[in-house]
Image (cartoon, rainbow, N blue to C red):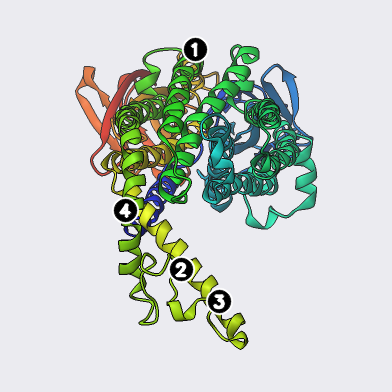
Amino acid sequence: MTQTIAPRVRTLVLLLLAAACALLAGAGPASAHAAVTGSDPAQGAVVDKAPARITLTFSEQVALSDDSLRVLDPEGKRVDTAKPATVSGTTYAVPLHSGLPDGTYTVAYQVVSADSHPVAGAYTFSIGAPSKTSVSVSGQSTDDGVVGWLYGFGRYVSYAGFIVMAGGAAFVLACWRRGSGVRPVQRFVVSGWVALTASTLALLLLRGSFTGSGKVSDIFDLSLLGQVLQTKSGAALVSRLLLLAAAALFIAVLFGAYDKREDAEEKRDLTFGLSIGGVVVAAGLAASWAMSEHASVGLQAGIAMPVDVLHLLAVAAWLGGLGALLVALYRAPADTPVDAPAVRRFSQVAFSSVLALIATGTYQSWRQLGSWSAFTDTRYGQLLLAKIALVVVLVGVAWISRRWTGRLAETVPVQASAVREKERVGAGADGAGETAAVGDAEVSAESEGDTGLDTEEQPGTEPAGTEPADSERAAQLARQQAARDAARQKRMRDADPNRFGLRRSVLAEAGIAVVLLAVTTVLTQTEPGRTEQEAKAASAASASSSPDEGASGALTLNMPFDTGGEDGKGIVTIDVDPARVGGNEMHVYVERPNGRAFDIPEVKVEFTLKAKDIGPLPVVPDHIATGHWSANGVQIPMAGDWQVDVTVRTSDIDEVTVSKNAQIG
């Protein structure tokens, strides 16, 4: 039965891992954790004279490099003159050449947010009057390509490695100390250490390209690696590597000296020392995430980081211990099966971990969302709802496992005596039936004194010249008998319906845990709901405070839209210059709520003067760059209060029309 089940287990685990990787691959680009909340000149603005500098304001502090802010003229040449600098708080500026000619200029930015994630985007403004530009503003960020995918996968592997290593070791020390001598459990914990070490090294190499150019060729650029080592994220990764060296020593003792200790008092002292040391190392590893990601930035960072460490430790104790239990149930030798008390102790550890997760998760949700509406209105909130649903399902399956554990504990005493009796009575019969396959020369162990040899082949009756052959034959038969005994014990163990039920429920828990870890990894790469809503509010306030008619006579209209589909929310901006009777130049800009320009399949504009029953006058602008359309010679026949209708289509079926009135002429 075990030989039949094991391939199915491997197949199911591989399928679950493939599903988790598909979830990561299909999750889309990692969202920025800092958003642009203001700029001067503003997106799409038309100014009379060239500004002396460009300023950008973010929702949180960001890290700048020499090329973080670039300003390009209509021909694509840089017109900024120095490195970007901090003006105050979260506002940054870059100076420009004096006497810039009229035209449309592109501002491109690429920075790193305080929680270590890259933020990139671009927008345009015009001096004097808009013009055509040769600059193509790509909607792809540096974390959207191959390097971004590799970095996201590395993060997933690092989380999984930590959970397997820390949780598996905790399972051995706290629940099943006999497991320190079980090879499959040893390999399970060591594989977690290897995965975490390899992924940490990979993240260290990928970091420079991930936050910079996004090019695969820059992965092994030593100058970029030197810059990474000077950042908060680089320091966290190096600290993790140093702690992994200590973790290697811990694992060596746990599966080496600890297993060989026979004196009870020495083993008790070593257990205490390993427990303290293991908790310290695991907490340090968890802190390497907390000190460089969400918890280190924003509201109550001093409380959030210890809470995040506790949250990660609880996840490891629960899910990592679950994986170790699964390995023990399926792969442990027949002479060292995982017993009911060990499963019961793990059930208690898992229950305590769930309570800790509920408490820490509630605090983290409040801190990252800030409002109930953020659960449904932000991507972070939607992913968090999915994570909560998976945890609820996982707890439900764990409750089923707990019931199987209780039944297993009730039947073990009775089954143990029955097994011993069956082995005593049936050993000879089983041996006879199985040894028949070896050859005619081999008879039953019972009839021949359990040696598996004919009386004529006993060591004492053979001629002196055949002693080496007899010894080799006896050793071979002894190994065969031991293998048969182990197989018989496994069959008897696997025939227990309670143990079989526990195996299946624990396997289901492990499968759900794999998907849960994938969702959690994507969640850590997503802009917190509180930040996203603050950026939306700042954009709305900026739009409402900007006048419809600028000093140059140009008309600017900002209209939020929501088509209801995926990526259906954004802001469409209409610029009409000079906004008077006769020919006008019109520019249309489409951007996400966080200020990032993006393309949509179609945008149409109509002008209607209801007071004179004129219109609608349709205008279909031409696509110029990412999120930018324009049309020349837009004719306004007379002055009046015109209604401007903009139809935005974000997919084949999702579209909406938004309107706003403005005085033209």
Asked if the residue at tag 1 contacts the one at tag 3, i.e. Cβ–Cβ closer than 8 Å, the answer is no
The earlier-in-sequence mark between 3 and 2 is 2
Residue hosting label 2: 451
Q: The residue under label 3 is which amino acid type?
A: Gly
**Which class describes the residues within 10 Å of circle 4: few (<14), some (14-19), or many (20+)?**
few
Give residue 554's position: percent from left, percent from top. 48, 25
Q: The residue under label 4 is which amino acid type?
A: Val
State the SS at label 2. Answer: loop
Q: Distance from label 3 to label 2 (Cα)?
A: 13 Å
Q: Would residue 188 be found to the left or right of residue 83 on screen?
A: left
Q: Is residue 311 above or below residue 25?
A: above
Q: Distance from label 3 to label 1 (Cα)?
A: 107 Å
Question: 483 or 287, which lies in front?
Answer: 483
Residue hosting label 1: 545
Q: Distance from label 4 to label 2 (Cα)?
A: 17 Å
Give residue 195's position: percent from left, percent from top. 60, 48
Q: Distance from label 4 to label 3 (Cα)?
A: 29 Å
Q: Nearer the viewer, mark 3 or mark 2?
A: 3
Residue occupying the point 43% across, 51% down: 334
Question: 26 or 498, which lies in front?
Answer: 498
Residue hosting label 3: 460
State the SS at label 4. Answer: helix
The earlier-in-sequence mark between 2 and 1 is 2
Q: The residue under label 1 is which amino acid type?
A: Ser
